[in-house]
Image (cartoon, rainbow, N blue to C red):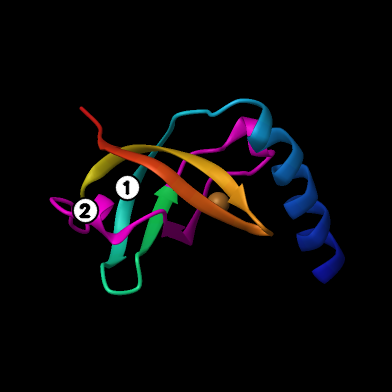
Amino acid sequence: MKRWIVLLALVCATSVWAAPEWVRGEITKLNAEKAQITLKHEAIKSAGMDAMTMPYKVKSADQLKGFKPGDAVRFTVQMQGEQMLVEQLEHAK
Ligand SMILES: [Cu+2]
């Protein structure tokens, strides 16, 4: 199981760098103090990631202003070390 996670992280790392991809999702939790957001997201093809709900760090807490749980959003991710980081976040229409 742990091996799979490492492998997945590696796949994410290489492909996410190549092309930013807008992903649709919904905010389930939001913690501005920790600059953290939990997103129920569709599959991220460029990262080889299935649809899931997972927590992400955002680049800066300011990005979370005007967002709340339940909001439909679209976002892009990038790798920061071994961690996926939300780079851009917008309300989806
Ligand atoms: Cu995910």
Which stretch appears magenta? 41-70
Horizontal arrangement in the rendering, residue 55 relative to residue 2 (left or right):
left
Which comes before the other along the chain, label 1 or label 2?
1
Residue 82 appears anywhere in the view: yes
User: Residue 9 colored magenta?
Assistant: no
Residue 1 in view: no
Say whether mark 2 is within 8 Å of ligand 1: no
Res 87 → quadrant: top left
Q: Which residue has dot 2 on it?
A: 70
Q: Residue at x 52, y 28 (%)?
A: 21
Q: Where is residue 51 in the image (x, y as percent from the top left)?
A: 54, 45
Q: Which amino acid does label 2 sit on?
A: Gly
Helix, strand or loop at label 1? It is strand
C-beta proximity under 8 Å, tags 1 and 2: yes
Where is residue 68 shown, x and y percent of the image?
A: 18, 57
Q: Which residue is drawn at 18% across and 52% down?
A: 67
Question: Which residue matches tag 1?
Answer: 26
Residue 92 placement (x, y as % from top left): 25, 32
**Left or right of residue 45: residue 65:** left
From the viewer's perspective, is residue 28 above or below residue 79?
A: below
Amino acid type, label 1: Glu
Q: Nearer the viewer, residue 67 or 51?
A: 67
Q: Would you call the spot at circle 2 few (<14 residues within 10 Å), some (14-19), or many (20 or more)?
A: some
Residue 42 location in percent, x, y? 48, 39
Name the quadrant of the N terminus.
bottom right
Q: Is residue 55 above or below residue 43?
A: below
Q: Is label 2 in a helix, a strand or a loop?
A: loop
Q: Residue at the location (54% across, 29% down)?
A: 20
Label 1 CB, ligand 1: below 8 Å? no
